Image: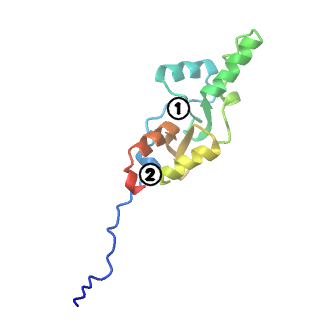
């Protein structure tokens, strides 16, 4: 009887895709100032086809986020009270406690953060500096491009 022994075979290692927030974040941001009016923000959001953006102070520090929803609340309040209220200031309507994300977070971890935090965008920060922003749509684009067998 002939015995053949080939030894233990190792399965070929699959290449894992390490896709990070910095690979898909937007770096050309539309920034808002706290002294802008809600009406000005609405015009920019519509013109640029965006749903919100970071609010920065005079030296570029992140101090908040303003979104379509924040603007809509002010506009509806004005219409309901039959008074033009679209001139409220961004500083009065922005979200001040901003959740941020690091550029080195894995894109799937970012997807999970979107689900748990229930926000539409995260400013991307590193060392106290605003580098960009990542949205749910950016994450969808990233995940859609992943190879099925390596994630």
The structure residue drawn at horizontal position 68% and vertical position 38%, both measured from the top left corner, is 96
Q: Position of residue 136 (x, y in %)?
A: 52, 39
Q: Which residue is mark 1?
A: 31
Circle on res. 20: 2
Q: Looking at the image, which residue sits at the far right?
A: 81
Q: Is residue 151 above or below residue 116?
A: below
Front tag of 2 and 1: 2
Density class for disc 1 (Cα within 10 Å; few <14, some 14-19, many ≥20) is some
Q: Secondary structure at mark 2?
A: loop
Q: Residue at x 75, y 8 (%)?
A: 82
In the depicted structure, whether residue 147 falls above or below residue 5: above
Q: Is residue 75 above or below residue 149?
A: above
Residue 102: where, in percent of width, then height? 52, 51
Location of the N terminus (image quadrant): bottom left
- Colouring convention used in this rendered image of the protein: rainbow
User: Crowding near pointer 2: few (<14 within 10 Å), some, many (20+)?
Assistant: some
Secondary structure under the numbered disc 1 in the rendered image? loop
């Amino acid at each position: 009887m002939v015995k053949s022994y080939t030894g233990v075979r190792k399965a070929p290692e699959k290449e894992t895709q390490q896709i990070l927030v910095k690979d898909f974040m937007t770096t050309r941001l539309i920034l808002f100032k706290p002294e802008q009016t809600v009406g000005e923000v609405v015009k920019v959001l519509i013109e640029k086809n965006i749903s919100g953006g970071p609010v920065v102070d005079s030296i570029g520090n992140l101090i908040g986020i303003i979104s379509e929803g924040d603007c809509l609340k002010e506009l509806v309040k004005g219409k309901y009270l039959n008074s033009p209220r679209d001139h409220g200031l961004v500083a009065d309507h922005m979200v001040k406690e901003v959740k941020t994300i690091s550029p080195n977070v894995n894109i799937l971890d970012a997807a999970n953060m979107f689900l748990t935090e229930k926000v539409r965008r995260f400013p991307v920060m590193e060392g106290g500096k605003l580098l960009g922003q990542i949205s749910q749509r950016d994450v969808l684009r990233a995940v859609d491009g992943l190879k099925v067998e390596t994630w």
